[in-house]
Image (cartoon, grey):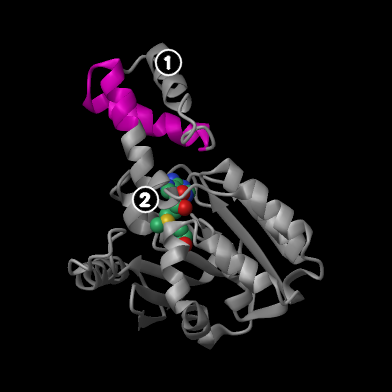
Amino acid sequence: MTGTEDLDRIVAAVMEGARYRNIDPQFIRRICAQEAQKRRGFREVVKASRSKLHQVGGAYQEKGMAYAEWEVWLDRLDGGLRNPAMPQFCREAMQYHASTHERLLILETFFKETLKSITPVHSILDVACGLNPLALPWMPVASDFSYIACDIYGDMVDFLNRFFKAAEVAGQAEVCDLIEETPSHPVQVAFVLKTLPCLEQVDKNIAQRLLRDLQAEHLLVSFPARSLGGRSKGMVKNYGNHFEEIAANENWKNIQRFEFANELAFLVSR
Ligand SMILES: C[S@@+](CC[C@H](N)C(=O)[O-])C[C@H]1O[C@@H](n2cnc3c(N)ncnc32)[C@H](O)[C@@H]1O
């Protein structure tokens, strides 16, 4: 099943599911094409494509997002990031993406410690961001900072733009597929948080290319130290080794390592 017409039908069938409708259609097409090369029947390819999309995106949103409700809440928060109720809103919403939910535990220290040597931060590019831009109240940013964020979900990007507006900051969210293209915005630091293992499920060779192509003076790269189910399964050791293999091929000036209860992070300076 690889003809264009077949592929159009497969993509359309995948997108009939409400959980897939907000994902970048080009990304869905890539996944469907990959799965169609491995399997034969139409139903089988649709099922496998949905399953892969779930693994790399949907699995982090099992609780379902409450964008409409959050926008009403945001409408009531005037004064931007300085509003004392803003951190409470951000914490509440971050619970709805499994990745930021886990980070709530270490939120008070994660950005303060990992970014200490480059504080105050002037510009950030947050790739495959999930709801991480909502951690802004805990990031050591300069007064004139800018923030660019991207992910495969169109509805998430719309919400994040709404958040940046309410927060009264120079932020912009965009739909992206990192497998297809690396964002080219020049920034002080690029966040690649808990994302490489997810991208590697689609393209085994993405890590080196992505890290090399990002136009950033510093890279904050992290890995989960526990699975979504809560088990650790030697992840710190395995991901630590994986990162060292990547670093061995690069000419980076400095690497700082940070180990938190549920996340392993590296600040790379180059
Ligand atoms: C493990 S989560 C990490 C989210 C965020 N970086 C954090 O640490 O909280 C992985 C994120 O990657 C996004 N994603 C998956 N494949 C992607 C791709 N090809 N391009 C951009 N984003 C992608 C998912 O939608 C999800 O939000």
Asked whether 142 or 51 is in front, the reply is: 51
- Residue 19 is situated, as x and y percent measured from the top left of the image, at 46, 36
Quarter of the image for the N terminus: give it. top left
| Tag 1: amino acid | Arg
| Tag 2: amino acid | Leu
- Residue 170 is situated, as x and y percent measured from the top left of the image, at 74, 64
For marks 1 and 2, give the one nearer the viewer. Answer: 1
Residue 202 is a magenta residue: no
Name the N-terminal-most of marks 1 and 2: 1
Q: Is residue 164 left or right of residue 32?
A: right
Q: Is mark 2 within 8 Å of ligand 1?
A: yes
Residue tagged 1: 9
Residue at horizontal 54%, vertical 49%?
65
Asked whether 250 or 7 is in front, the reply is: 7
Q: Is residue 59 left or right of residue 104?
A: left
Residue tagged 2: 199
Range of magenta residues: 23-49
Asked whether 77 or 178 is in front, the reply is: 77
Number of numbered discs: 2
Residue at horizontal 61%, vertical 81%?
140
Q: Secondary structure at mark 2?
A: helix
- Residue 194 is situated, as x and y percent measured from the top left of the image, at 39, 62
Residue at horizontal 50%, vertical 56%?
96
User: Would you identify the image quadrant in which residue 215 lies?
Assistant: bottom right
How packed is label 2: few (under 14 Cα within 10 Å), some, or many (20 or more)? Answer: some
Q: Secondary structure at mark 1?
A: helix
How packed is label 1: few (under 14 Cα within 10 Å), some, or many (20 or more)? Answer: few
Is residue 161 in view? no
Would you say the magenta stretch is mainly helix, strand or loop? helix
- Residue 67 is situated, as x and y percent measured from the top left of the image, at 62, 49
